[in-house]
Image (cartoon, rainbow, N blue to C red):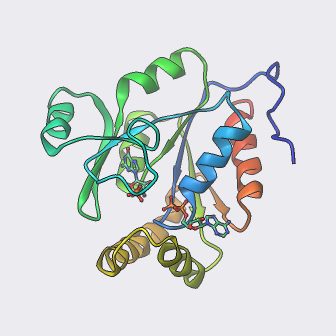
Amino acid sequence: MPAQNADPARPVAKRLTVLSGPSGVGKSTVVAHLREADPQVWLSVSVTTRRPRPGECDGVQYHFVSDEEFDRLIAENELLEWAQFAGNRYGTPRGPVVERLDAGTPVLLEIELQGARQVRDSMSDALHVFLAPPSWEELVRRLTGRGTESEEVIQRRLEVAKVELAAEKEFDTTLVNTSVQGVCDELLALMTAPKV
Ligand code: ADP
Ligand code: 5GP
């Protein structure tokens, strides 16, 4: 199916969108799909102290940094938000986001709940989208089936997932990730709709 915003002449809103949801729900899959579907949307690349998974490249999925470098980024106020998640730290570099928004590019952040709350406090007109699994059983299946984490890390992420699912009402809207293509289409429509 063609992307809804494939026409480069179509005007897009100058909007910051935050996509959040429990680990394993399919955020990275949706975002990777969206990147291909609409080059007008700019995806922020976060910094993290987590080790790369097989296939992940520095500067593509994340900027992989040391604890010392992460400390420096916090100290120099270079992060728009940051959080500790399941034993690692993650943060959004501020400069590139501000630059893209100033240029009128729709910007997407794929971040966890604590970071989403910080963005709500600092950038009041951001659109907050919650990505939900079709069911708890399917979330467990996806997280386990991905095969990238140890059993202990999976359990830790599932504990955090319960807290994240309970926060769904804080978000402006929820998309259920039954079909990646369907979610991408809905997300693009939200991101590029004229602001009200
Ligand atoms: P997250 O980034 O939210 O942690 P991932 O994008 O890594 O999640 O997805 C977790 C697993 O679920 C991956 O194996 C991915 O292929 C699978 N997945 C994602 N979306 C769907 C979907 N709509 N239907 C079935 N499997 C999916
Ligand atoms: P993962 O280790 O699975 O790539 O990511 C773990 C969690 O960290 C996911 O919920 C992801 O959305 C979140 N995350 C990724 N980048 C950032 C970021 O820059 N800030 C925050 N707060 N969370 C992030």
Q: In this view, does 124 lie to the left or right of 9?
A: left
Farthest bottom residue in view:
137
Count of numbered circles on the image: 0
Q: Nearer the viewer, residue 136 or 181?
A: 181
User: In percent of the image, x 52 and y 21: which residue is there?
Assistant: 100
Left or right: where does residue 113 sit relative to residue 140?
A: left
Split into quadrants, the picture shows ligand 1 in the one at bottom right
Q: Quadrant of the C terminus?
A: top right
Q: In this view, does 57 lie to the left or right of 135?
A: left
The answer to which image quadrant residue 163 occupies is: bottom left
Residue at x 74% of width, y 64% of height: 179
Examine the image and state in which quarter residue 131 appears: bottom right
Q: Which residue lies furthest to the top in this view?
A: 103
Relative depth, front residue between 186 and 44:
44
Residue 48 at what x, y percent from top left?
30, 46
Task: Name the foreground residue: 131 vs 196.
Answer: 131
Residue positioned most to the front: 54
In the picture, measured across the screen, residue 118 lies left or right of residue 71, that is right
Q: Give the residue at x 87% y 48%.
A: 1
Give coordinates of residue 66: x percent, y percent: 19, 43
x and y percent of residue 152 in the render? 29, 79
Residue 129 in the image: x percent, y percent? Answer: 58, 51
